[in-house]
């Protein structure tokens, strides 16, 4: 299950990719070629791919949450010891039309990137 801002969304998770991005306050090379840097921290960012569902209302509810015009959300994703809850913003939200039937549209291939607001490790 997927949790965003304390709400559960019943749309199947196909894939969850995790990246550890290292963010520097500065990183520069000196004249002798040595790298000097100050690390701010390590950010855990995720790419989520969701499957299709016959519940178009649930899918629409998730789409509206993922495209909500707010700065940050609280998300909960699977982790080694159960789950990881953190604050993130959403980027790269997209899907594609699968079919139209009886005036209803069914989409597939929903993806979203969760970009952490703060470092997971510093």
Image (cartoon, rainbow, N blue to C red):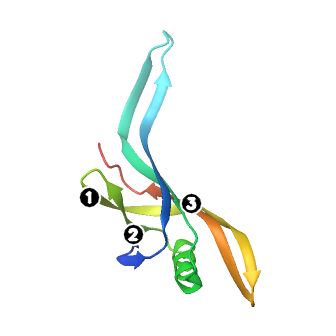
Where is residue 8 drawn, in percent x and y? 39, 77
Q: Picture quarter containing residue 121?
A: top left
User: Which type of secondary structure does the marked residue at label 2 adopt?
Assistant: loop
Question: What residue did someone put label 2 on?
Answer: 1
* Pointer 2 or 1: first along the chain: 2
Is the residue 113 above or below the residue 102 in the image?
above
Identity of the residue drawn at 34% across and 61% down? 86
The residue located at (45%, 14%) in the rendering is 34
The answer to whether the residue labelled 2 contacts the one labelled 3, judged by CB atoms less than 8 Å apart, is no
Tell me where residue 82 appears, x and y as whole percent. 26, 58
Res. 117 mark = none
Which residue is identified by label 3? Answer: 91
For label 1, count other residues whose C-alpha is less than 10 Å away and answer few (under 14), some (14-19) or many (20+).
few
Q: For marks 1 and 3, give the CA distance.
A: 25 Å
CA neighbours of label 3 inside 10 A, class few (<14), some (14 to 19), many (20+): some
**Looking at this view, is 5 or 38 the one in front?**
5
Secondary structure of the residue carrying numbered label 3: strand
Residue 46 percent across, percent down from the top left: 46, 53
Farthest residue, direction bottom? 102
Image vertical order of residue 80 relative to residue 109, above or below: above
- Left or right of 73 on screen, residue 112: right
Residue 86 placement, left or right of 73: left
The quadrant in which the N terminus is found is bottom left
Q: CA distance from mark 2 to mark 3?
A: 20 Å
Mark 2 vs mark 3: in front = 2
Going by the picture, which residue comes out furthest to the top?
A: 32
Disc 1, SS = strand
List x then y, in percent, for residue 36. 41, 23
Label 1 sits on residue: 82
Which tag, 2 or 3, sits closer to the chain's start? 2
| Nearest to N terminus: mark 1 or mark 3 | 1
In the depicted structure, whether residue 13 falls above or below residue 37: below
């Amino acid at each position: 299950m997927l949790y965003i801002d304390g709400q559960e969304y019943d749309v199947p998770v196909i894939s969850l990719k995790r990246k550890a991005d290292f963010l520097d306050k500065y990183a520069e090379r000196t004249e002798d070629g040595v790298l000097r840097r100050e690390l701010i921290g390590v950010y855990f960012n995720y790419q989520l791919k969701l499957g299709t569902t016959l519940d178009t209302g649930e899918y629409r509810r998730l789409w509206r949450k993922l495209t909500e015009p707010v700065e940050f959300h609280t998300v909960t994703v699977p982790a080694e010891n159960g789950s990881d809850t953190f604050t993130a913003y959403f980027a790269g939200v997209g899907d594609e039309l699968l079919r139209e039937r009886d005036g209803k549209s069914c989409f597939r291939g929903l993806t979203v990137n969760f970009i952490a607001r703060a470092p997971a490790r510093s």
